[in-house]
Every structure is written in structure tokens, then in C-alpha cells.
Image (cartoon, grey):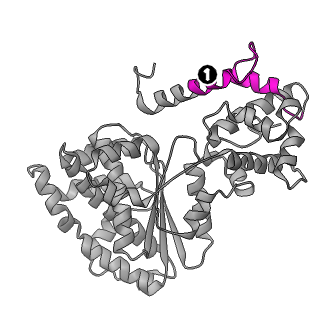
Amino acid sequence: MKGNVLGDIRAEQDRTMLDTAFWESADYRSLLESYDRPIIVGRRGTGKSALAYRLSKHWKSKPKTLVLSISPEEEQVIGLRDIFDQFGEKYLHIKAGTKMAWRYAIYMEILVELGDHYKYKNNLDLSQIRDHYSTWGSRRQSISTKIRKKLKNITAPSDSPQSRIADLSDNLELELIEEVLFEALEKSKVQYVVFADRLDEGYSPDNLGVGIIDGFIQAAIDIKSRMNEKVVAFTFVRDNIYRAISKLDPDFTRNIEGQTLRLHWDEYNLFNLVCYRLKSAFNSDHENSVRIWNQFAAKELKGREGFRIALKLTLYRPRDILVLLNEAFLKANSNDRKEIILEDIEYTCGVSDVQLTKRSYPLIAARGLLRQFIQEHCHGDQAS
């Protein structure tokens, strides 16, 4: 038996299970049906990256649809702080400057892909934007590296933050680039869907850190309306960052709140997610979720009531229940069993020396909540 029989908790390492046993939740289906809520918000471990992967795969299979994925690394986001610092310390100034920079970057990434496409490159008129196109950089370079390079070349050190922001749209020729891109997409009769994930990598909870992500969200919203849905950008945001934006951005209610889908997991969806993975992992012949669960759970853990015992020890997130059950199955396997029992759950939770009763559920759940709070709000020595 593999160490993680129900799959890896990191979506990047869980492609096989996501391809064969993905549970299509109501949130997933609503995102397929409409572009009304392109800002997807969820806590750590609620499956944002898994959702981004599956949505990306869906749109790649559609005709006349191209997909662009933006997933910066930690050091790349940290590197942007240095260049975006030129917009000053005021939150509204940071948001305004980063919004234009992100909008320009997304447009240029799409233009470069169109220019490299064997079929659509003939519909792209580069005569007016040749300098932008030739200096943007290759697809091998990260988007943050190209933004840094571009902003360094067009801003003067002597300019004030207000002057840099006021001149940024003209210096980037945003309107012209938008016009050229829209015309190329119209001629090609193609749509671009952008997926931006892991924007919280390298995140710092200050004005600049929040403003960088808020700027991307605002850029994604603007692009959808300006490009008449020829370009649609889905942005996946962690819950604590979203709350920070709601406090700092005075236009939050008007611009962002109505564009947001908050990921929600309940017992029904988590039960089916687990059973889909059990069926795939063990090649079960059953179709009914309860029968699948009962095939691999014994004694007190049988049925939905048994699953609820395990679920109450989590924060109702896919990551929690997968970690819990992966460990439980590993423990069962070490005792030459294919079914998990209550003792395996107790061992996994570190409560094997006490009886696992209803009284212990709140204590274990509270421990998980405290751990989550520390992970999301404390850094360095504070976390220790």
C-alpha cells in the first residue's frame, strides 16, 4: 500500500487522483456554467489548486479556447515587492499601480502565446506594438521577472509615486495593447481563460503584500469587462488575504464582493470525495458511496455515522480528512488489515491513550483551528 493511498494533499503532486477520482462539487459546476464569480476564495486545504487544475483541464478540451496558467513561486512574489514599492506606501496608490502592471502583464503573456501559435499568429498585428512584443521576454521566464524588467525600464527614480501611477498607463500603452489583442482574438474567434493560483506564495500581511494581490484581482475583473469576455481570469485567493483586502480596500463592496465564490465543504461533499478516491485507489466495484465506505471501514466506523466520527476530528476541509485517512490506512496496513477501525483514527490523532468520545471532538478540532491560525497569521519567531 502506498503511503498516501487516497492521494497527495498537494494538488501539484496529486494529478493521477485528480484525473481519475475528482468529485465535481456544486462549486465546481457553478464555475463551469458562468463567469459571474471569477474570484474563488477558500481557506488553506479547501482544494483551490485542485479546482484550478480541473477547471484548466476542462477549458483546454473545449474548441476555440486557450488556457493561460499563472502560478508564481515564493521568491518571484517576494521579488515583486521591490519593484512595486515605487508606488508609495498608501494602499490605494499600491493597488492602482499594481492593477495596471498586472493587466499589462496578462495582455502581454496572451499576445506572446498568440504570436507563437501556428494558426492564430497571422491574425495578430504587431506593427503598432512591436517594441512591447519583442522586449517582453520568452515564455520560459516567469511573469514576475518580466514585470520587474518592464517597470524598471519605464520609470525614472526622480518621479514621485503619484507621477509614476499617473503616467503608467500611457507608458505601458495599455489602451493600444488592449485594442490589438481584442482585434486578434476577434479575428481568431478564440477565447482565453486565465487561471491564477498560489498568489499567496511569499505573501506578507502589510499594505504592499495585500495590495499586490488586490491589484491582480482588480486587473482580472477589469479585463473581463473590457475584453467582453474574450479574456476571462479566474483568481484563487486564500481566505485570510481576502479578509485583509475587505478591510483595506474602500471599493471592496462595489468591485469585488459580488464577483466572489466562497468554497464550502459539508459532510455530503466530503463523504463523496473520499469514496470516489477509495473506489479509484482500491479498484472497488461498488457504485454506491456508502457501500464503498463500508468495504474499507469496520466496526464503529461503518456507515455515514462512522465517517462522521472521523470528520468531526477535522476542520471540514479535504486536506484534513485525506491526511487523517491516509494515516489511518497506513496504520491498518501495518497490522495486515485492509479496513480501518476506530483505533487507527485514534492513533492518527494522537489520542490513543484516551478514549475517543464526543467530549474529545471539540478539543481536537480546537487544536486544529489554533494550528491553522498560527500558520496563516504568525511568522518566524511568532509561530514558534
> Percent from the top left, x then y, of residue 221?
37, 64
> Percent from the top left, x then y, of residue 6?
75, 42
Residue at 36% x, 68% y: name it: 223
In the image, is residue 86 part of the stretch drawn in magenta?
no
Residue at 70% x, 55% y: name it: 22
In this orientation, does residue 146 appear? no
* Placement of the N terminus among the 4 image quadrants: top right
Amino acid type at mark 1: Leu
Q: In the shown orientation, is residue 378 left or right of residue 320?
A: left
Q: Residues within 10 Å of mark 1 (few under 14, many from 20)?
A: few
> Percent from the top left, x then y, of residue 67?
52, 67
- Give the total of numbered labels: 1
Q: The residue tagged with tag 1: helix, strand or loop?
A: helix
* Residue located beneath label 1 in the image: 363
Residue at 40% x, 65% y: name it: 109
Determine whether 218 is above or below 320 in the image: below
Determine whether 160 is above or below 294 in the image: below
In this orientation, does residue 6 appear? yes
> Relative to the observer, which residue lies in front, 170 or 276?
276
> Relative to the observer, which residue lies in front, 158 or 299?
299
- The residue range painted magenta reads 338-367
> Percent from the top left, x then y, of residue 180?
33, 79
Q: In the shown orientation, is residue 155 left or right of residue 176?
A: left
In the image, is residue 364 part of the stretch drawn in magenta?
yes
Residue located farthest toward the front when viewing the structure as drawn: 359
Residue at 34% x, 83% y: name it: 125
Determine whether 231 is above or below 185 in the image: above
